[in-house]
Structure formats: C-alpha cells, structure tokens
Image (cartoon, rainbow, N blue to C red):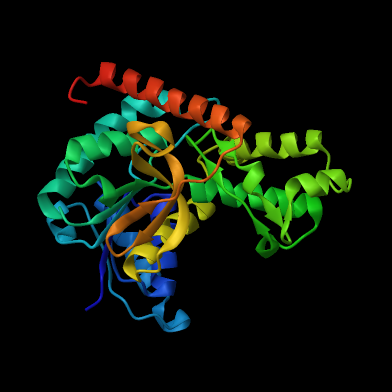
Amino acid sequence: MRKKITLIGAGQIGGTLAHLIALKELGDVVLFDVAAGIAKGKALDIAQSSPVNGFNINLSGTSDYEDTKNSDVIIITAGVPRKPGMTRDDLLGINLKIIKEVADGIKRTSPNAFVICITNPLDVIVMALQKYSGLPKNKIVGMAGILDSSRFIYFLSQELKISVNKIRSFVLGGHGDSMVAMLGSTKIEGKKIGELIKEGKITKERLGEIVDRTKKGGAEIVKYLEKGSAFYAPAASGVEMAESYVNDLKKELPCAAFLSGEYGFNNIYAGVPVIIGKSGVEKIIQLKLTKDEEAAFKDSVKSVQNLYDAAKKIDPDL
C-alpha cells in the first residue's frame, strides 16, 4: 500500500516537493492550496512527466481538506514568502493566521500524520502548529537544520575546492541569523576544521565570513530573485526528512524538534540533531558542545523564545 503524502501550499516549494517525491516514488501526492487551480495544474503537469521519468504514483490537486484525509505525511509550505527587505519576523503575524487554519484542517482529517513544517519564521511557526493542532510533539518537526547545514557544507566545499560528500557538518539552533554552525563537529576529509586552519588551508576570518553567509543564505537568494525566495534546496531538505520517516531509515538529521530537558531546555522547539524513523522523531542526539557553541546555542534558543512571546501577544490562543 503506497503512502499518502499531502503538500499544503502549492507554491514554488510545494511544486518542487511534489516533483522530487514523484521521482523518488515515495508515495501518492496530494497538492493542497486555497488556489485549487494552481494545485491541480502543477499536479497534472508533473503527472504528465511520468512516462518520461518512469515513475508510477498518483498526483492530484485540491482546495478541500477532505481530499487530504488519512495522509501519512504532511509537508507544510503554506504562507507568505519573504520579500526583499522583509525579515522572517515580519512574516509572523501573517503566517500565524494561515498556520491556525492549516492546524485545524490537519487535526480534522489526518491526526496520525507525520508533519514537517517549512513555513517561516520556522521555529515559532512549528511551535504554534503543534499548539494549535494538539498533535504529538514527536510527530511535528520543522525543516531548517538540513537546509542550513547544506548551505554551510556547499560554501565550504566551494572555498576548499573539495567535494561536498567529503564534508560533515551540522548547524543547530534557530533558523536564520541566530543559527549555530557546529565548527567543533565539522570534519573535512576526516580532519577537524581547526586542523585546516593550522595548516593554512582556511583562515579563521574566512571561516567566519562563510558562517555569516550561511546565516544570510535565504536573504541572499531573496535579493537575487526579487520576487520570491529559495525553493529547490528547501524542498530537497524536506524530502530527506519525509524519506527517513516513510522508509524508516533512522537517519540522523538536524531538525527543529521539541525539547524536554535536552541541551538544558524545556517546552520549546529548537534545531538539534534527531533520529527520524517510522515513529517520527525517535531520539534527540545530545552533542557535546564547546563553551562557545553552548553560549551561541543558548542565545539562539532565547531569540526563538522571544519571538514566540511576540506570537503569544498576537494570538492569546498560544
């Protein structure tokens, strides 16, 4: 029996998600959007590529939550994307309203789904989604860490002229300017980044610039595109999480997950490495942090908490 994967929001990320899921044959795809025509059109367009690409799944588009009933996985991209000059926080008020409706639709039709949230400002929206929907905390996660880590690894590979496959790294904390690049856990061809600095392959200053570029990775793309924001890399990151759940791969992935005492935090979503398998978030990995990393992680979680406090002022239901 094929899995049913619903994508809420048929914009650029939603369409790319549908295409990638189809190519991997992860499950049947339902594209949901309040603009039914866009969802139906994209689903039909991708379906018509199936004879060329040789995949065999069903794709459909809808604006009715009933068509999403009993989904195994739901990936949420609904919301307004950032416009040039807009911070993730500016989006808060607009996207909270949207996520409240989405949470209600999910609770009614697919209470057992594994839900991946991509809507910004990510950490706060995923927390609001869990509160509004009441779904189990291990079944609601945010996609951010994979994307931030991927950007960081890519920039490092370009700088060092080394294949991305030879670099291992993690990015923790909130998505955006407060994210924490785990330099202590970064390995390039098995060597710690500190060794490369000693060997003169990269300077501390240059590394700092790369970390900074990673933090602003989304904004850099928004600036180039002018009308819209990143969608290929975010979609690829979301699919990696869905695939680990659907196929019980138990991959270790950095995601925004609910903390109950891990890293010294309670009752908050933050970017940490987790194991995703058929039960959802099956384990939170506790990395040993350096003093600097611990301080930066604390600051990052604090900025998520501050934004969540702002969200509670906007909507007392939280």
Where, quadrant-wise, is the C terminus in this rendering? top left
Which residue is painted at 52% across and 38% down in the image? 227
Seen from the viewer's position, the closer of residues 38 and 247 is: 247
Residue 220 visible in image: yes
Q: Residue 157: x, y in percent?
A: 73, 55
Which residue is painted at 56% across and 39% down in the image? 289
In the rendered structure, the answer to whether residue 279 lies left or right of residue 166 reads: left
Q: Residue 243: x, y in percent?
A: 39, 66
Q: Quadrant of residue 222?
A: top right
In the rendered structure, the answer to whether residue 162 lies left or right of residue 175 reads: right
Q: Residue 209: x, y in percent?
A: 74, 35
Residue 87 visible in image: no
Which residue is painted at 77% across and 44% down in the image? 194
Q: Quadrant of residue 295?
A: top right
Seen from the viewer's position, the closer of residues 89 and 300 is: 300
Where, quadrant-wise, is the N terminus in this rendering? bottom left
Q: Residue 18: x, y in percent?
A: 38, 63
Which residue is painted at 66% across and 42% down in the image? 183
Seen from the viewer's position, the closer of residues 174 and 183 is: 183
In the rendered structure, the answer to whether residue 228 lies left or right of residue 93 reads: right
Residue lying at the far right in this picture: please name it: 200
Total marks shown come to 0
Against 67, residue 220 (above or below) is above
